[in-house]
Amino acid sequence: MLNRQMESQGTAFKNEGGFRETLTRVRVESKAQQKNAPECPECGRLMTKRKARNGKNTGKDFWGCTGVRKIES
C-alpha cells in the first residue's frame, strides 16, 4: 500500500510539478488576470502590466508576456 502511494505521489509530482512550480504558476496566473490583458503575439499567453526599470522608459508601464522565452542557440 505504501509503495502504491509513493508511486502515485511521484507520478503527480512529474505531471503537476512541485510546490515551488505550483506557487509560481499561481502567482503568474493571478498577475495575468488583469482586465483587458492582451494576448502575447508570439505564444498566445496573457500578458501582464510591468514597469520599466532601465533605459529611457524607466518608470513607465508596458505589457510583458507571462511565458518563459526559450533562447535559441
Image (cartoon, helix red, strand yellow):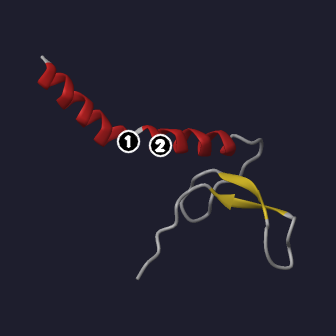
Residue 3 occupies quadrant: top left
Instruction: Find residue 5 and report its horizontal and vertical position in percent.
Output: 20, 23
In the image, taking residue 8 as reference, residue 1 lies left or right, namely: left
Q: Is residue 71 left or right of residue 33?
A: left
Judging depth in this view, the residue of 17 and 49 nearest the camera is 17
Give the farthest residue toward the bottom. 73
Q: Is residue 61 above or below residue 11?
A: below
Q: Which mark is residue 37?
A: none
Name the residue at 64% across, 54% down.
39
Residue occupied by mark 1: 17
Lateral position of residue 4 relative to residue 67, left or right = left
Q: Quadrant of the C terminus?
A: bottom left
Residue hosting label 2: 20
Name the amino acid type tagged 1: Gly
Q: Dot 2 lies on which element?
A: helix
Residue appearing at x 55%, y 57% in the figure: 67
| Distance from Cα at disc 1 to Cα at disc 2 | 8 Å
Residue 24: x and y in percent read 54, 45
**Quadrant occupied by the N terminus:** top left
**How many other residues sit within 10 Å of disc 1, few (<14), some (14-19) or many (≥20)?**
some
